[in-house]
Amino acid sequence: MPPTPFNPAAPSAEPIALYVHWPFCVSKCPYCDFNSHVRADIDEDAWRDALLDDLTHEAAMNGGRPLSSIFFGGGTPSLMPPRIVETLIDAATRHWSPTHDIEITLEANPSSVEAARFADLATAGVNRVSLGLQALEDEALHFLGRAHDVREGLAALDVAQSVFSRVNFDLIYARPGQSEADWEAELEQGLSFGTDHLSLYQLTIEPGTRFATLVAQGKLTPADPDHAATLYERTQAMTAEAGIPAYEISNHARPGQESRHNLTYWRYGDYAGVGPGAHGRRGGLATLRHKKPENWMNAVARNGHGLQSEEPLAPEDRAREALLMGLRLGEGVDLERIARISGLTIEALVDGNAIARLSAHGLVRREGPQLSIEPAGMLLLDAILPEIVAV
């Protein structure tokens, strides 16, 4: 019997998450569009009002639902004026119904300037910080294009742990020339800080980046895939032993301390995105805000919101997104749920023969409607997904 077709207009009692994008950086960095992101001075009141208008529009589309998380991201959100952060939190918790344990996260660079604002941001309502340490070696930080050094980064981490109830920081491994012993020592140091969450990413060479150019010029040799796999396996073993096992391919947490906001993405829940360039998913619609700050501001002034587009997602697109996101999680996906939200049959979602074949090799596990990638399969996730995802 086919599942009940998904109705985007139907009201939902499922929690929603809110993403707020603050596009400004205070200095040039390798991750930003210099022309649209670097600002020395902004009209703070105008930005507060525009963000409130954009948020109000999203809330009118799906207000009243439980709000499980707010995430402030973008250029340098930890340099947002705390009064704007507080105003946005207050508005969001009026428009939606905050859960009793609502998670309010802010991304931060580990600089002394930003760390000096942590206490005020905590007072404003932020209860979790995600700190971009990226490495615990000065030479590696220089290679990665970071402005901070290890001393400054660890000082910021110390302030964060004294102010926020929950702290995450990230590290990048499988860097050129990094030995197994090097990474073990760095990860052991990272684990010694006692945070409840770690994001541990392998260095990837993305097309169009500075790293890709260096590789093409023969000035950079990426880590050998077998060596990178060894580092991944050591990462899983060391974090599990420390009580911070992986719950997603690159994210580790003590039980109960997983990122609730990111889990909304990975579990394919709805999330509202406000601010320049913010994406969102709302009742089967994909929303996108104007990326350039000036264009976004003009759109808000003209329309009351910064939307550039609001497009219905085809059933196949909803199913594909849910599978590709959810199979990154150790818990995997519920195929019956994905069939329900997409209107497709389970047989149309996944290739049963491929699942059976990969299960025999210990790479995939299916128990009734639950499908997950085994730990050994996570190493091969990019190759496995095209094999088993049929949409």
Image (tube, grey):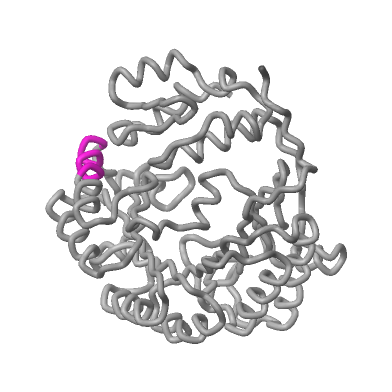
Residue 189 location (% of width, % of height): 19, 65
- Magenta stretch: includes residue 46: no
Tell me which residue sits at (72%, 83%) in the image. 45
Tell me which residue sits at (51%, 36%) in the image. 324
Q: How many marks?
A: 0
Q: Quadrant of residue 149?
A: bottom left
Give the residue furthest to the top: 353
Q: Is residue 304 visible?
A: yes
Is 3 on the left or on the right of 69, as rendered? right
Q: Observer-nearest residue: 332 or 42?
A: 332
Which image quarter holds the N terminus? top right
**Is 384 placed above or below 244 here?**
above
Tell me which residue sits at (26%, 78%) in the image. 151
User: Main SS type for the magenta part?
Assistant: helix
Which image quarter holds the C terminus? top right
Give the residue furthest to the left: 181
Residue 106 location (% of width, % of height): 50, 70
Q: Observer-nearest residue: 86 or 301?
A: 86
Q: Observer-nearest residue: 230 or 223?
A: 230
Q: Which residues are magenta?
A: 225-233
Q: Is residue 74 visible?
A: no
Residue 273 location (% of width, % of height): 66, 58
Is 305 on the left or on the right of 143, as rendered? right
